Amino acid sequence: MINNARSANVEIKGNANGGGYICAPISLLPQSYPKYAFDGAVMLSGPFGLLVDRVSRDGDFLRGALCEARGVDEYTNKLLLLYEGIYLDERTYDDAGGGGGVGRAWGEHARSADRLGILRSDYMLHERSMESGGGGGGVTVDLDDELRRRRYSLKQVELNTIASSFAGLASKVANMHSFLTRRMEGNNEGGGGGMGEVANFLNENDRAVGGKGGDGGTMDGRGVPANPAMTRLPMAMAVAYNRYVARYLRPSSDDGGDDDGDGGDDGGDAPISSTSRPIVLFVVQPGETNTVDQRMLEFALWENHGIPVVRISLAEAYDRAVLDESTGRLALIESYDNDDDDFISTTASGGEVAIVYYRAGYAPTDYPSGMHGIEWLARERLERSRATKCPNLGYHLAGTKKVQQELARPGAVERFFPDDATTARLLRSAFAGLYGLGADADVDDLRAVGEVLLRGMEGRYVLKPQREGGGYNFYGADMARKLGENCDVSSDGSVALGPALSEFILMERLFPPQQRAILLRNGRVEGTGMTISELGCFGTIVASGDGDVVHNEYAGFLLRTKFSGVDEGGVASGFATLSSPYLC
Ligand code: ADP
Ligand code: MG
Ligand code: MG
């Protein structure tokens, strides 16, 4: 399990191209994790998929939630402007200066296109006794004998809807941890002195999370669970891909084609020749170091489903992706002259794009040419096509931190499940305390700010801007300073929030149980010490333009482990290591 290390700050043996690979940061052994909480995360995958899909289609909600943040964060504003122009406005192609569009809606192809979500909902275990509201009781699973152990509830850190990574590497790590623990746990065959130690290590950590291993008890399903990420992510892509093929390339197909996503012909349809097979476009960052994780997905798409991938940056997409305005067909050509307006029809080069999969585009730095530059123009062009976007703009916006916080307001998540109070309650149970810092901040929001500014409780909260990728949050004294600089506190103790805060949310800080771990970085032991972990649960969803959900399932996991003293998370950003849960 390796990372492209071209830009990593370590000495490695390069290959002929000057590149090279290093081991991704890992935890030597898995971390104990209560099975009830893991099962709860799995159970939440489907409901969170539905929530994202429903939020993505509710323009009023998204605009309301983000109306203040867009005023101070031009990146969020740009996403929302594109979303409005393509999915909400009645603007036509002619209005937009295209000419010859005979009144077609600017976003008509995008609106009717399928949507693909590869989501990763991230959680921390949180001491029940520390809960400050928000969700309340936590996920409950009907396993009575587990109840006494439920010292922790499962709380969502965030929901990633774009470029959710580490499905590939996490599967490999789970295999390694599964091997190591089964080979060594309680097994002294072969006589290694370390074997009993592994068992002791695991039992000690089991006790830390209230598991059974520490009691010497037994449990079905104890150990590292199988991680299906590298079959389920490609499968969801294949479902979306085969729907595209059935709709546009085999229009005679009766039922939407191979919806089971096995990539095979279920009979009837003539196979698509390999030269006319459409592609999945991976939109990646130039200079990406986490390439191995992405390549594993690419190879699995090919091996399991015969689906070809082409990797391209947003800037390259501007030069090479051509949109046929009349049909919405998106194709890749070798090079494309953007000064030439005559791009209505394209030659069939075999590069038709069925799915646009973003592993870039989630950060302002992915658009170096500025708000009207080529990267944003490329994003808009890709979005307006009939290709299935992963994610489309609505899914992307549904994953913003401000939306997460707005969904936690009383009645908000419930509004998306009018006939299903049980699902709404389940989702809400995973919400931590979330507080808005805009002009509509309510009494709870202001109380939270007051606790930081007036009562020295900055250790109980995290301040988060509208950013993705790790490294942006404020903690402790930095957070108090940031809040203080942007608030007026009057002599009676009341707090007035400054407008710059409206792109931030304040979140209850979570305190997962600490466990001992040995962490490796650059292939060497970085240290041994107390750590905390964050569970990521992949979920995939495929839905039609009309809102029919044709696929929605749990799709694997990721555990990231970091030393307890480290505030931030993120493997690529250098804070955490890849690990696995050892269910107990
Ligand atoms: P990003 O989109 O940048 O990953 P996150 O919300 O996941 O943003 O925050 C980054 C990291 O900060 C998380 O991986 C976690 O380690 C830490 N973190 C975020 N929220 C909390 C919280 N409420 N309590 C404790 N740690 C948190
Ligand atoms: Mg994120
Ligand atoms: Mg995160």
Image: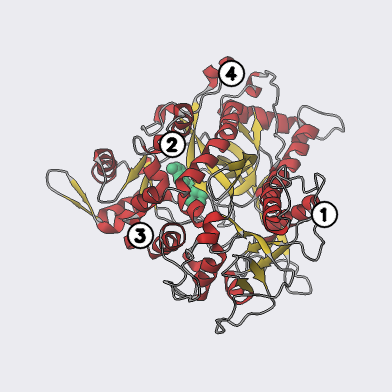
Residue at mark 3: C-beta within 8 A of ligand 1 = no
Against 108, residue 548 (above or below) is above
Which amino acid lies under the numbered mark 2 shown in the image of this protein? Phe
Mark found first going from the N terminus, 2 or 3? 3
For mark 2, give the secondary structure. Answer: loop
State how far apart marks 4 and 3 are (Cα).
Answer: 45 Å
For mark 3, give the secondary structure. Answer: helix
Mark found first going from the N terminus, 4 or 3? 3
**Residue in view at x 66 percent, y 79 percent:** 335
Number of residues whose C-alpha sits closer than 10 Å to that of mark 4, classed few (under 14), some (14–19) or many (20 or more)? few
Mark found first going from the N terminus, 4 or 1? 4
What is the number of the mark on residue 143? 4
**Residue in view at x 42 percent, y 45 percent:** 404
Side (left or right) of 487 relative to 555: left
State how far apart marks 4 and 1 are (Cα).
Answer: 50 Å
State how far apart marks 2 and 4 are (Cα).
Answer: 22 Å
Marks 4,1: beta carbons within 8 A: no
Against 97, residue 74 (above or below) is above
Provide the residue designation for mark 3: 70
Which amino acid lies under the numbered mark 1 shown in the image of this protein? Ala
Provide the residue designation for mark 1: 270
